Amino acid sequence: MRIPLIAGNWKMNTTVAEAEKLASSLRDILDKIEGIEKVLCPPFISLTTLSEVLQGSSVKLGAQNMYFEARGAYTGEISPLMLKGLVEFVILGHSERRSYFGETDELVNKKVQVALDFGLKPILCVGERLEENEAGKTEQVITRQLKGSLANIEPGIDLVIAYEPIWAIGTGKAADGITAATTIKFIRDTLANLWDSDAAQKVRLLYGGSVTGNNIAEFVSQPEIDGALVGGASLKTNEFSSIVGQSVAIKRQGT
Ligand code: PGA
């Protein structure tokens, strides 16, 4: 059985003081919800403070990105060595990194490899653009992203993959549950071809893109979808807690 997971990607939002406040209010509510992994991914600058806020809590931390070298002359970058011990998860290959900062599958692949070497769990993001979706190229794009980002990665790893159609991110236009589940099933089948079906079954597959408390049920009621990567709605205590609470309740009913 895969444990459901809801991760909040705060992106470039919250000062350290705001992050501290948000994390403490989330901690108080989320600690009462069991049977699901809860991960907050604040900006790098707040990770140390939040690791103190979340000491002894069931709420875990993730980073939003990472460089692939452990140390050296890479001005402005954050390394896996710095994140080790501070976070359990790291988001890699988010579409905003790919489109605004030129990240390629090859670069993401190096980051995935290094994250695993340092004992960090990657939340690898894949997803197609609107034009690709409209041209019927979703599966082709996702196959390329998976093969590229997971090249030479051994099967059996503790990996999370978030399917985030780019047209659904921050637009308020989420995919519908059935379409998301169909693509997510395609991702699992692709992993089974790349590795084997046991290894593919272990990977948690999330949906991301305009997830809210109003539509989360549509996604987590699909057995193929193990949770969500939440952007905007993860900045609101009530909204994010509702997403987590509904997810665990729905997943419990399904078992
Ligand atoms: P959104 O972002 O929920 O604000 O659409 C999701 C993401 O980019 O991870």
Image (spheres, grey):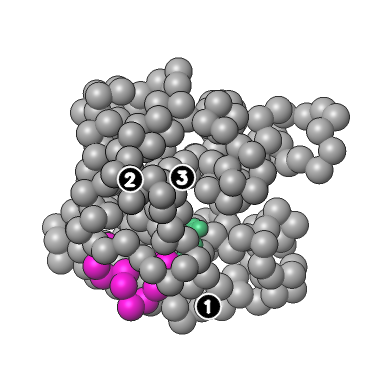
Judge whether residue 13 can be spotted in this image. Answer: yes
User: Which residue is rendered at x = 57% and y = 57% of the image?
Assistant: 41
Residue 188 quadrant: top left
Q: Position of residue 134 (x, y in %)?
A: 33, 51
* Disc 2 residue crowd, few under 14, some 14–19, many 20+, Cα 10 Å: few
Amino acid found under the numbered disc labelled 3: Cys
Question: Disc 3 to disc 1, how far (Cα)?
Answer: 22 Å
Label 3 or label 2, whichever lies nearer to me, is 2
Say what secondary structure mark 3 lies in. strand
Residue 177 at x, y = what percent? 24, 62
Disc with the residue nearer the chain's start (3 vs 2): 3
Query: How many neighbours does mark 3 have within 10 angstroms: few (below 14), some (14-19), or many (20 or more)?
Result: many
Q: Which mark is residue 99?
A: none
**Within the magenta stretch, is there residue 190?**
no
Which of the two discs, 3 and 1, labels the residue nearer the N terminus?
A: 3
Part of the protein shown in magenta: 210-219
Label 2 CB sits under 8 Å from any ligand 1 atom: no
Q: Alpha-carbon distance for marks 2 and 1?
A: 35 Å
Q: CA distance from mark 3 to mark 2?
A: 21 Å
| 151 relative to 30, above or below | above
Camera-side mark, 3 or 1: 3
User: Where is 242 relative to 91, above or below?
Assistant: below
Does 224 sit above or below residue 43?
above
Q: Residue at 14% of width from left, 61% of height from top?
A: 254
> Which secondary structure lies at badge 1?
loop
